[in-house]
Amino acid sequence: MQRELFEQFDDEKVVCGTDEAGRGPLAGPVVAAAVILPHDFPVEILNDSKKMSEKERIKVEAIIKEKATAWAVSAISHKIIDKINILNSSLLGMKRSYEKIRDAGYKITILLCDGNKTPDVDCPVEAIVKGDAKVPEIMAASILAKNHRDRLMDRADKKWPQYGFAHHKGYPTKEHYEALKKYGPCPIHRLSFRLEDKKTKRDEELF
């Protein structure tokens, strides 16, 4: 972790980290979170959310929500994704989460974002490639975003069980492609995404 990269920020400065979950799925929202951590937060419990088990993420999520100075989560719907594309939707989610914290009265010194693009916000902002494995505030945001989105997809599974959303969370798995081929898209599929399995389609064209 690279908290030392930002040690120039003293106790009066406020660092906020933000990250998203759900850029790759074929269905459902993209979710972004923003987090401010206190200096005494137990950063050793944090990790890249993709490297944690569901059980670990849920346990750490509870600690983040209890001990964080501030946190916020925003979901950007599949309809907006289809309208403005997934990158812009991810950045919009980060911006909205940041603004929720800002509007709660926190004066943020710098916003640190995972990746190589930054949202349009009214404070200094820096993109950090693989920040979800380096910066505690971004790690915490990645965990909140991932868990929130997973719960939304579990809820979708109850409404459209034929797609298996509880298993793959909307990602392009074999199970998901087979369901799409059989049932077609449901109301939360991202119609701007390629919804057919390219490999399966190519194989079929050979026969």
Image (cartoon, rainbow, N blue to C red):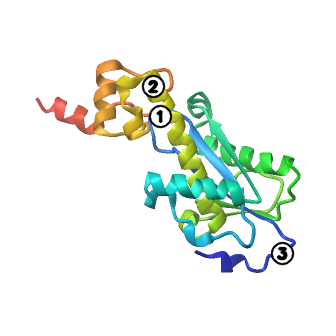
Q: Is residue 41 above or below residue 189?
A: below
Q: Which label number is shown at residue 158?
A: 2
Say which element carries label 3. Answer: loop
Cα distance in 3D space between marks 1 and 2: 7 Å
Q: Comparing marks 3 and 2, which lies closer to the viewer?
A: 2
Q: Which residue is mark 1?
A: 154
Label 2 neighbourhood size at 10 Å, few (<14), some (14-19), many (20+)?
few
Residue at 50 percent across and 26 percent down: it is 188
Residue type, mark 1 in image:
Asp
| Residue 16 picture quarter | bottom right
Residue type, mark 2 in image:
Lys
Decide which of 38, 136 is in the foreground and name it: 38
Count of marks overlaid on the render: 3
Split into 4 quadrants, where in the image is the N terminus? bottom right
Label 3 neighbourhood size at 10 Å, few (<14), some (14-19), many (20+)?
few
Split into 4 quadrants, where in the image is the C terminus? top left
- Given contact means CB atoms under 8 Å apart, are the residues at marks 1 and 2 in contact? yes
Decide which of 11, 120 is in the foreground and name it: 11
Residue at 48 percent across and 28 percent down: it is 156
Residue at 47 percent across and 34 percent down: it is 154
Q: Which residue is mark 3?
A: 11
Say which element carries label 1. Answer: helix
Mark 3 or 2 closer to N-term?
Answer: 3
Q: Is residue 179 above or below residue 13?
A: above
Report whether 94 appears left or right of 58: right
Report whether 21 appears left or right of 197: right
